[in-house]
């Protein structure tokens, strides 16, 4: 950022897309005030951080996700492990130009997806550490610490909403979608990271996985639903194994002294596309 500080550059991005925002307290429209904060007509205000992101949480929120986890997640995504999946998402998004990534973490999926298209991406996550990393690495998009239960966005704002391996809020998704927009949710299928699952959970019920209930709830939430399975294997460099263990909840249950050896890993997911 040569001419502008990160705070000022973030403020410019937010100002250029201010119609996407609404006050999470009173739902009034917002404006950028003196390049330092977002403020609504009722004078509720939220500071733009020096790193360029905005914190719009209305309550304190503890996150179990650490800086190390987000660094590991970025390393894994940057390795290309999810390239095929991201390509499928780009295809399914068609020409969407306003994109919200819910549970965006450190922002790598959204940044990589938006690099291939025109438009603006906004990432939201309740974990401040993730948004800090996103703002540091990807200043071309807007990053927001927030909670969809008290959403900081205006209704009918987004042409596409992404929900990649993350909890969902379907009622809020439907409020935020423009007519004809879509929600793209990614959920694990039975073979997702199966090589890791087999070593961590051998001979236990956790060695197998079903997403049937999640898919059924998605079907119940949208009038038009398409489900596409994406399955492939990728080689895994030995130095990335610790990062994979750090970023996935499966790895958090690894007992001390357990040796994990992985030369390849399976990505096996259902990509759910919903329209209202």
Image: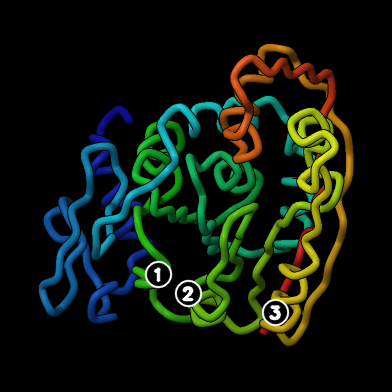
What is the crowding at mark 2: few (fewer than 14 residues within 10 Å), some, or many (at least 20)?
Answer: some
Q: Say which label, 3 or 1, has the lower sequence index.
A: 1
Q: Nearer the viewer, residue 267 or 162?
A: 267
Query: Is residue 31 positioned above or below 7 on the image?
Result: below
Which residue is at 51% across, 43% downward?
A: 107
Q: Nearer the viewer, residue 149 or 120?
A: 149
Which residue is at 66% across, 72% downward?
A: 182
Which residue is at 62% across, 37% downward?
A: 248
What is the crowding at mark 1: few (fewer than 14 residues within 10 Å), some, or many (at least 20)?
Answer: many
Query: Is residue 114 positioned above or below 43 on the image?
Result: above
Viewer-side label of 2, 3: 3
Q: Quadrant of residue 95?
A: bottom right
Local SS, label 1:
helix
Residue 157's mark?
2
Q: Say which label, 2 or 1, has the lower sequence index.
A: 1
Q: Quadrant of the N terminus?
A: top left
Local SS, label 2:
loop
Pointer 1 residue: 20
Residue 275's mark?
3
Q: Say which label, 2 or 3, has the lower sequence index.
A: 2
- Looking at the picture, how far across and down is residue 65, in whole percent? 44, 40
């Amino acid at each position: 950022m040569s001419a502008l500080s990160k705070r000022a550059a973030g403020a410019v991005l937010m100002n250029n897309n201010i119609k996407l925002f609404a006050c999470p307290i009173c739902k009034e429209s917002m404006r950028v005030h003196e390049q330092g904060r977002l403020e609504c007509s009722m004078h509720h205000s939220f500071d733009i951080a020096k790193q360029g992101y905005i914190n719009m949480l209305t309550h304190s929120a503890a996150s179990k996700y650490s800086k190390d986890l987000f660094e590991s997640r970025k390393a894994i995504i940057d390795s290309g492990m999810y390239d095929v999946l991201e390509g499928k998402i780009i295809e399914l998004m068609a020409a969407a130009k306003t994109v919200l990534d819910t549970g965006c973490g450190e922002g790598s999926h959204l940044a990589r997806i938006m690099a291939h298209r025109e438009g603006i991406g906004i990432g939201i996550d309740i974990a401040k550490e993730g948004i800090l990393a996103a703002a540091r690495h990807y200043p071309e998009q807007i990053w927001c610490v927030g909670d969809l239960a008290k959403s900081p966005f205006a209704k009918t704002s987004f042409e596409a909403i992404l929900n990649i391996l993350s909890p969902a809020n379907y009622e809020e998704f439907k409020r935020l979608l423009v007519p004809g927009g879509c929600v793209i949710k990614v959920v694990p299928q039975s073979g997702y990271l199966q090589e890791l699952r087999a070593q961590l959970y051998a001979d236990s019920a956790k060695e197998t996985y079903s997403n049937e209930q999640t898919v059924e709830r998605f079907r119940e939430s949208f009038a038009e639903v398409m489900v596409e399975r994406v399955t492939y294997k990728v080689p895994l460099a030995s130095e990335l194994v610790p990062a994979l263990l750090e970023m996935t909840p499966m790895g958090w249950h690894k007992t001390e002294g357990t040796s994990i050896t992985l030369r390849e890993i399976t990505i096996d997911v259902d990509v759910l596309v919903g329209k209202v």
